[in-house]
Image: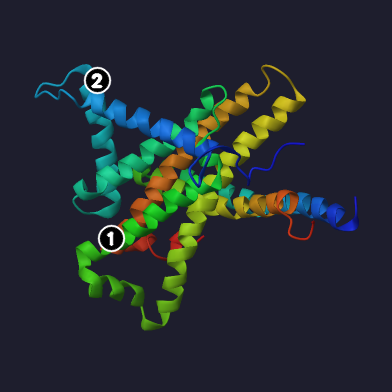
Amino acid sequence: MNTIEIVSVAAAAFAVAFGAIGPAMAEGRAVAASMDAIARQPEAAGTLTRTLFVGLAMIETTAIYCLVVALLLLFANPFIQ
Amino acid sequence: MIESPLVSHVIFTIGPVPVTRPVVTTWGLMIVLAGGGWLLTRSLKQVPSRGQAALELIVETIAGQIKDTVHAEPSPYVSLLGTLFVFILTANWSSLIPGVEPPTAHIETDAALAVVVFFAVIWFGIRVRGIAGYARTFAEPTIFMVPLNIVETFTRSFSLIVRLFGNIMSGVFIIGIVLSLAGLLVPIPLMALELLTGTVQAYIFTVLATVFIGSAIGGHSAGRSEGETQA
């Protein structure tokens, strides 16, 4: 393995590992806030759940981007012939 | 070495057109869905049978969800959005059949679905507001937002592609890795989790398409339709 391959594998692991931290904390906060809202106002649970799912999808996208970057590094790396 | 999820293998070629495995799976799903829809709606009655009642429940639930999001009469949008939901759901769940890989785990299928949504948003926007009216939505809230809004229409389609692709593909990938590490029964909980992810992603794809269409036709759901769809 040459240097570029080693760096690519390390960078892929780095991207997934640290790219997961932010979305995980953000999703936790979003779920906690919506739990709080549902506990206060159970009759609004339907709307809150729908909005929560859409919001979670948005937050999760950042983690998915990290995953895609990691996959590009591993499988479609432009610097490895 | 596990093979790359970004390439798909050509099974056979029709003339100059190479046909890959996801295409074959997609056509199979389309035949099943269209044939099932034809069979179930062949003899609709005033007093519904059990199957017809279940079908009506599904259609009415989808129509109600669309009505809540778009704040308009849902009938023009039910056919497109309902088909999207049912197709993505069955595509995600098709991994339950041994030997079948979900077509949504390949980026081409997701790109095709997102292109359908991209043009449907423009089509419905122009049909409801007219060309000038739809063009004016790009200048909301101020004229300086025009470049950002134009960029947003592309980036949100791209994020639709990447979100569905990433979620489904990562599930298939992880099941493959676990299967290669530990044998028979270990991947089953992961497959159950993958069913849940497939449902949620089909729901989210449809809800986002609904929100985009709702913001294009200018319902009163503007609060979460513009800025928050960026991601």
Element at label 1? helix
From this view, report whether residue B16 is shown above or below residue B157: above
Q: Position of residue B142 (x, y in %)?
A: 36, 80
Q: Is residue A73 left or right of residue B17?
A: right
How far apart are the two marked residues, 2 and 1, measured between alpha carbons? 34 Å
Q: In the image, residue A35 lies at what x, y percent? A: 48, 43
Mark 2 or mark 1, which has the lower sequence index?
2
Q: Nearer the viewer, residue B187 or A6?
A: A6
- Camera-near label (2 vs 1) is 1
The residue drawn where x is 9% and y is 24% is: B46
Answer with left or right where residue B138 lies relative to residue A11: left
B33 left or right of B63? right
Residue in view at x 59 percent, y 53 percent: A26
Is residue B38 shown to the viewer in this render? yes
User: What is the chain letter for disc 2?
Assistant: B
Say which mark, if any, is on residue B51.
Answer: 2
- Way the structure is coloured: rainbow
The reply to whether residue A43 is visible in this rendering is no
The structure residue drawn at horizontal position 76% and vertical position 52%, both measured from the top left corner, is A12
Q: Residue furthest left?
A: B46
Q: Residues within 10 Å of mark 2 (few under 14, many from 20)?
A: few
Residue B33, x across and y down, in percent: 34, 30
Q: Are marks 2 and 1 in contact (CB under 8 Å)?
A: no
Identify which residue is drawn at 26% across, 43% down.
B79
Badge 1 density bin: few <14, some 14–19, many ≥20, Cα 10 Å: some
Please state the horizontal and vertical placement of residue B17, each as a whole percent of the image.
Answer: 49, 46
Q: Which mark is residue B123?
A: 1
Above or below, B47 against B20 in this view is above
